[in-house]
Image (cartoon, rainbow, N blue to C red):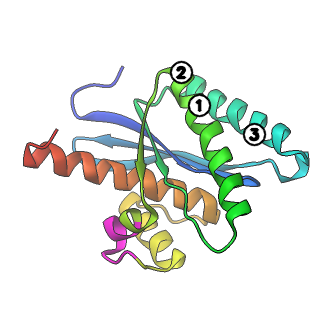
Amino acid sequence: MPGSGDILILGLDPGSRHTGWGLVREVSGVLHMVDTGVIRVASLGDMDARLGAIFQAVSGLIASHKPDEAAVEDVFVSKNPASALKLGQARGAAIAACAVAGVKVHAYEPTVVKKSLVGAGRAEKSQVAFMVAQVLGWRKPVAEDASDALAVAVCHLNQRRFKRLSGVS
């Protein structure tokens, strides 16, 4: 059970082919990367099989690591509505796994995540990855999807800290 000032966040960067995940623990204001990875479901073919695999994998992560909360990026809508729909379905599978396990989910716009880490809402992925590595003191290469998941976890911890310090609930 986490002690005072000790919280574990599961960050999720959902995708219909690859879902990044990252676990970040905050202890007395210091962030530590616990683990990270990518759920790869592209080879499963059918969307229903991929969604089931995402649900099961996120459920497994929750069962083994017992995060206190989860943070997920909101759907980014680009030019292709079909892609946005698939992304939303993958996001839904991940969120459903959290809900079934009783893990509260917090959602953040991609621009908020980028601004929280880099200071600019339109930052490049490489800039976000660099700042994630700096904040977490991580020197090994991390897959892009995993780095994005760590970024949303760090963003959530920053937002929690800000709300706590400013008295916002």
Asked whether the residues under the numbered discs 1 and 2 touch, taking CB atoms below 8 Å apart as contact, a structural biologist would say no
Q: Position of residue 116 (x, y in %)?
A: 32, 65
- The image quarter containing residue 131 is bottom left
User: Does label 3 or label 2 sit earlier along the sequence?
Assistant: 3
Residue placed under numbered mark 1 in the picture = 96
Disc 1 to disc 2, C-alpha distance:
9 Å
Query: Is residue 123 magenta-colored?
Result: no
User: Does label 1 or label 2 sit earlier along the sequence?
Assistant: 1
Q: Position of residue 154 (x, y in %)?
A: 38, 54
Residue placed under numbered mark 2 in the picture = 101
| Tag shown at residue 51 | 3
The residue at 65%/74% (across/down) is: 79
Label 3: how many Cα within 10 Å (few below 14, some 14–19, many 20+):
many
Label 2: how many Cα within 10 Å (few below 14, some 14–19, many 20+):
some
Horizontal side of residue 99 vs 39, given as left or right:
left
Amino acid under disc 3: Leu
The magenta segment is 114-121
Q: Position of residue 87 (x, y in %)?
A: 66, 54
Asked if residue 16 is positioned above or below residue 103 in the image, the reply reads below
Amino acid under disc 2: Ala
The quadrant of the image that shows the N terminus is top left
Query: Is residue 120 magenta-colored?
Result: yes
Disc 1 to disc 3, C-alpha distance:
11 Å
